[in-house]
């Protein structure tokens, strides 16, 4: 399938993204330029004038209510739109500096490994090991490297013991891990995941995000995660995008986006409970208390506030990442 | 519980045979069944297929499959008795030719179905496609199509079973003893199942392409499928089955 149109929409409204400017970023590994998309059977745009720049090495979380266009955005970033899904496509998506319309899905997949939302449907093999092997064989990874790549990928997501199991015998959560392992084995520059923890228990969800964070920090893999669990995104992502009605309504560093907590709540996106708590406390006692994201961070902030050291805001940096512990 | 065509893991001699050898063996039984008209030999072929199941450690699967086929073939058997009028009547409308032909058709159907299903149950679809590409030089996209078809058969039968369970839980009498009523209840479910199946296949195609499907070359497969002595023995057995069928027909 070919794109229906690739011209830039002339009259679409400017996005209201919080942090990032609309102009393409030179170091962006993925960038959208006034991206709009309406499904062939749709009447209103699923994506509406999206300007998103993902810097190489960033860890980006995308959140939003159901029907906000998150999965459509994932499809556009991965090249499925415009190469597979029909509709009216305006604007541009640039993957590693090249327009996605000018690259095949295979070309894009050399840069971006995608884990789609429908895990069952994307499995192509019957055995876990074969599922991980599939991409490695296709991309012509040297045979000597393949066993190590498979083992590493399975170890990273904690399913080394499932290597010989049939996929049909796995739980939904285990299948999600298999899909993630298959993507990780390709060692992509960008990892794009559409709700990778939707069927996982809290402990496994944390394990997946810990893995993603490690890959992001140690190997410099750019991670883009579409996720409904705001606590996880806030604890692990550096940049947060909020979608609503097909638009990217907020985009920027996590804490900058969370400053719009009241607007987020009206859009059906709840901030982490500790953030809601510190926000309420800040309104009640004044602006001295920083907006916090994690439990440990909140505890420290409160101790400082009540011991008269509330003005010390050095802890409120992106460098800190405390343990994810839902309240 | 493993369904029809679900792979059953194991280390039996059947599991270790080259996938192409298994395919040849299965087709040899089919060919033998259609070459011969000898009822005893057809029954022996059925026993051979059942034996394959036990050798492969899937005896229960083989028996379950046989029971399913027996029920289907019983229906066919009766139809044949009803419609074949040639020969000498031996009881009411039943003729001797009718009985022989009905038995032959039923046994052939079972002989043609059993070995292929059983051997696919001890062969991973990816190994089968890998061997077809590397050894039989089949283009990868055709082998992948075959692999995908085999992989999705149990997925769709499982999905149908889930739909039926859900409908039964909501009071639809799928547990009725009347087969015609049951069929009339199942038929309307085929359309949504077909629609969801097409969507799922489409997603699988996207997923495959997003993982470099079109870059695949014949030699990029990780596994090799060499022929061993046991494969030679199995191929000799296959040849012997066809030769014997020719001799006793």
Image (cartoon, coloured by chain):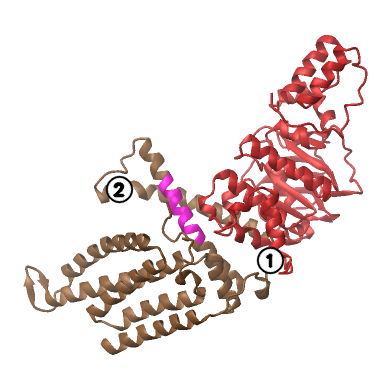
Chain colours: A red, B brown
Q: Residue at x 62, y 47 (%)?
A: A176
Q: Nearer the viewer, mark 1 or mark 2?
A: 1
* Label 2 residue SS: helix
Same subunit: marks 1 and 2: no
State the image coordinates of residue A59 (x, y, percent, origin top left).
80, 42
Q: Is residue A71 magenta?
A: no
Q: Is residue A37 left or right of residue B39?
A: right
Label count reads 2
Asked whether the viewer can see residue A3, the reply is no
Start-end of magenta stretch: B151-162
In the rendered image, the residue lying farthest to the top is: A285
Tell me, yes or no, if residue A141 can be seen here: yes
* Residue B219 x/y as whole percent: 67, 75
Q: How far apart in space, not on screen, are marks 1 and 2 (Cα)?
A: 45 Å
In the image shown, does A201 or A195 lie closer to the viewer?
A: A201
| CB under 8 Å between discs 1 and 2 | no
Left or right of residue A250: residue B229: left
The 10 Å Cα crowd at callout 1, few under 14, some 14 to 19, many 20 or more, is many
Between A194 and A266, the one lying in front of the other is A194
Does residue B226 lie above or below A219 as drawn?
below
Q: Callout 2: 10 Å neighbours few (<14), some, many (20+)?
A: some
- Residue at the extreme bottom: B247
Q: Residue at x 32, y 80 (%)?
A: B34
Q: Name the residue tied to disc 1.
A: A138
Q: Is residue A75 above or below residue A258?
A: below
Magenta region's main secondary structure? helix
Residue B182, numbered label: 2
- Mark 2 belongs to which subunit? B
Find residue A182 and report its horizontal and vertical position in percent. 67, 55
């Amino acid at each position: 399938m070919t794109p229906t149109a690739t011209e830039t929409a002339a009259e679409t409204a400017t996005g209201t993204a919080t942090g990032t400017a609309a102009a393409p970023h030179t170091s962006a590994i993925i960038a959208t330029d006034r991206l709009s998309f309406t499904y062939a059977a749709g009447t209103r745009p699923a994506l509406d004038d999206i300007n998103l720049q993902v810097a190489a090495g960033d860890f980006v979380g995308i959140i939003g209510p159901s029907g906000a266009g998150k999965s459509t955005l994932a499809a556009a970033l991965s090249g499925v739109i415009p190469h597979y899904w029909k509709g009216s496509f305006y604007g541009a998506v640039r993957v590693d500096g090249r327009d996605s319309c000018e690259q095949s899905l295979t070309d894009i997949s050399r840069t971006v490994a995608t884990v789609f939302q429908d895990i069952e449907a994307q499995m192509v093999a019957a055995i876990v090991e074969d599922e991980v092997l599939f991409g490695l064989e296709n991309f012509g990874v040297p045979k000597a490297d393949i066993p190590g790549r498979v083992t590493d990928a399975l170890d990273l997501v904690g399913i080394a013991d499932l290597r010989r199991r049939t996929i049909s015998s796995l739980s939904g959560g285990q299948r999600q891990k298999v899909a993630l392992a298959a993507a990780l084995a390709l060692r992509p520059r960008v990892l794009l995941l559409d709700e990778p923890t939707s069927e996982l228990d809290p402990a496994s969800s944390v394990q997946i995000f810990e893995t993603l964070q490690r890959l992001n920090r140690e190997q410099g893999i750019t991670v883009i995660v579409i996720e409904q669990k705001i606590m996880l995104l806030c604890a692990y992502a550096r940049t947060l995008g909020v979608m609503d009605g097909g638009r990217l309504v907020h985009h920027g560093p996590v804490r900058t986006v969370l400053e719009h907590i009241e607007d987020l709540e009206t859009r059906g996106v709840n901030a982490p409970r500790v953030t809601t708590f510190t926000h309420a406390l800040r309104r009640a006692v004044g602006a001295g208390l920083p907006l916090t994201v994690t439990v440990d961070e909140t505890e420290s902030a409160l101790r400082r506030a009540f011991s008269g050291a509330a003005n010390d805001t050095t802890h409120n940096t992106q460098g800190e990442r405390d343990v994810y512990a839902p309240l | 519980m493993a369904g029809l065509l679900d792979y059953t893991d194991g280390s039996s001699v059947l599991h270790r045979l080259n996938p192409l050898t298994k395919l040849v063996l299965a087709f040899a039984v089919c060919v033998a069944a259609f070459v011969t008209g000898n009822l005893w030999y057809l029954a022996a072929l059925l026993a051979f297929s059942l034996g394959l199941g036990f050798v492969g450690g899937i005896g229960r699967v083989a028996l379950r499959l046989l029971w399913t086929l027996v029920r289907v073939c019983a229906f066919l058997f009766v139809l044949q008795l009803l419609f074949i009028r040639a020969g000498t009547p031996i009881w009411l409308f039943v003729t001797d030719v009718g009985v022989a032909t009905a038995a032959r058709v039923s046994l052939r159907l079972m002989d043609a179905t059993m070995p292929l299903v059983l051997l696919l149950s001890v062969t991973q679809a990816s190994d089968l496609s890998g061997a077809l590409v590397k050894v039989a030089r089949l283009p990868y996209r055709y082998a992948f199509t075959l692999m995908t078809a085999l992989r999705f058969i149990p997925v769709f039968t499982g999905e149908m079973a889930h739909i039926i369970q859900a409908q039964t839980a909501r009071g639809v009498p799928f547990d009725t003893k009347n087969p015609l009523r049951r069929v009339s209840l199942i038929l309307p479910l085929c359309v949504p199942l077909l629609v969801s199946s097409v969507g799922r296949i489409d997603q699988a195609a996207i997923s495959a392409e997003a993982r470099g499907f079109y870059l695949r070359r014949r030699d990029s497969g990780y596994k090799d499928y060499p022929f061993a002595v046991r494969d030679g023995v199995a191929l000799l057995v296959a040849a012997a089955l066809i030769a014997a069928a020719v001799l006793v027909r």
